[in-house]
Amino acid sequence: MKRRLPLPLLAAGMGLALVLVSLASLRTGTSDLDGLGRSARGVAAWLGLASPLPGAEQTIVELRLFRVLVGLGVGAALSLSGALLQGVFRNDLASPSILGISSGAALGASMAILVLGGYGPRVLTDAAAAYAPAAVSLSAFAGATLVLILVTLLGSSGGRVSVPTLLLVGIALNAACGGLLTAIQSFVLEDFEIARAMMSWTFGTIDDRAAWHAGAVWAALLVSALVIPFVALELDLFAGGEEDARALGVHTQRTKLLALGAAALCASVAVAVAGQIVFVGLLVPHILRQISGRSHRSLLPLCLLGGPLFLVGTDLVQRLAFADAYLQPGVTMSLVGGPFFLYLLLRNRAQIQAW
Amino acid sequence: MVNALEAQGLAFAWPDESAPEGTAARRAVDGIDLSLAHGELACVIGPNGAGKSTLLRLLAGLCAPDSGRVWIEGDEVMRLAPRERARRVALVPQGLETLPQVTVETFTLGGRYGHLGRFGQARHEDHAAVRSALAEADAADFGKRLLAQLSGGQRQRVLLARALAQEARVLLVDEPTNSLDPEHQLTVFDLLARLCRESRAGLVVTHDLNLAAQYATRVLLLQAGRVVADGAPEVVLTREVLAPVYGDVLAFGEGGLGGIGRYVLPRRR
């Protein structure tokens, strides 16, 4: 057995790193507002504890603050969601994006953008315009939820979820959503503004977020994290199969419901708030399992630290290293995540063939 | 004194999509009544597909019967809270759907789930129960190894150890000696016999008629989802009872175990 770091030490180290990364991220940006002191004063002002910074500086600090807050929340939500799904499906390759949550959200978001852009019936465009900033996110949330429900329904029979079927159904629905998405995009290709908005949404971004974005994702995260104590030990016992867990005294139906519900909630809100940021939910739990072992009692809480650290950290590194060529975090994740996913597949080839 | 295990009119059919419209699928378990007292070690025998494993699942409360009811120590099994059920009845399956990537000790600790508090950290007594269970199943030597690193027979003993760690008074065991060497076959049955003498109740599915003859206090013969014979080994394990069910493949040796015959498979001509 590999020697592992004691859990409290690991958690403390990750917590410290998280604070440092967040602070560094708070003072890094395209505008030349530097100095932690000024950023701190801006944050204090936003909280109503100090007078605002002069001119645009206050706005810049607030934008950076929400950027960091959304980044942290989204990173944690996606990782937690991935870890929960992997536990329920007893498969390290399950993730929110494979289950179609992201493509469903993309479809929902594109439809909202389409309607906001003046396409579709008048009633709808008026309604959307009234809730303009939230319309895209709400529609993305609805799309994610719908596709997830569809995947779960089609991928299970008689109340039992079959892993291979579920993954295949997920792939098929991903493709179907992708097809619809392309159709919508090609339909509005001439309309430069709308096509651009759709495209940039699929990149996944934490720029230009408002307080409510951060609030939504943190609220969803909080609710989802509350299930951890009720499912962690139980998911460990799922490892030998659902019926085996039931024989040991696990309330399997409740465990599945709580874990799937929490996973769906935090992933769909995260995607609704920040667009498609893929692979976080796959990568972070996998890395954490290597460090701290397979037990969900350490894995799930650590995801709340590791996810944000990974997302905000990679984003920070990317911005510091290539200041002139800024990539949205969704793009960075795809660049890192694709090859890593391939590596995972190859490493687990035997396990996959055993399905 | 209330019976350890009681079943009345148990029936269960697997959903069968190949069955023609309107016809009922053949029942895996078709009207079984059963009662088992503490102190009994009953062996369940019968041909493949007779419903032995399905019977165990029903008795363990893992699936609801189509009709009939099961009581564990006086309470209906489907109404027990899952943890309470796990404290009363332990099932040793033939194998697992997937192999958990954990050490033998961690895996065996899973048997303590019913005893842990709501957010329970394993306490001293849980670890003690795991240690003694592993020792009893002769699995203590590989406690630190991963399940995947064990042989089939070692894994089977670990499954038994986990059930022992549950400290349930009703033990349901599905073919525990399948991949065991002769010595461990005896070890496992010695252990089961001792546990049952010390006030537990055991129901063990096996294809090994010799072990059943040697250890069982009672033998149940299943055929097509029904109990066709139920009684002492020397009553059930006879040519007259077995031949109609198994056909003429069994050869009965003479002498052997306390007057009961030995059963061997003859060479097919």
Image (cartoon, helix red, strand yellow):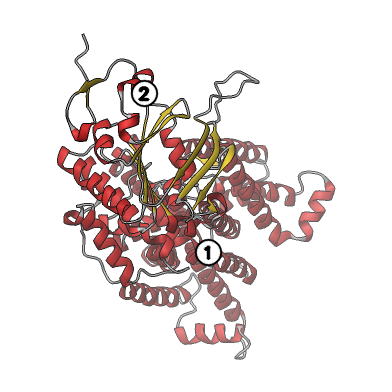
Judged by depth in the image, the label closer to the viewer, 1 or 2, is: 2
Residue depicted at x 19% and y 15%: B267
Q: Is residue A100 left or right of residue A300?
A: right
Residue farthest right in this picture: A123
The percent position of residue A70, horizontal first and vertical second, equals 54, 67
In percent of width and height, residue B119 lies at: 45, 69
The relative height of residue B54 versus residue A215 in the rendered view (above or below) is: above
Secondary structure category for the residue under label 2: helix
Crowd class of label 2 (few under 14; some 14 to 19; many from 20; radius 10 Å): some
Chain for mark 1? A
Quarter placement of the C terminus of chain B: top left
> Which residue type carries mark 2?
Val
> Which chain's residue wears label 2?
B
For label 1, the residue is: A227
Q: Mark 1 is on which residue type?
A: Val
**Residue B241: which numbered mark, if any?**
2
Residue plotted at (31% across, 56% down):
B198
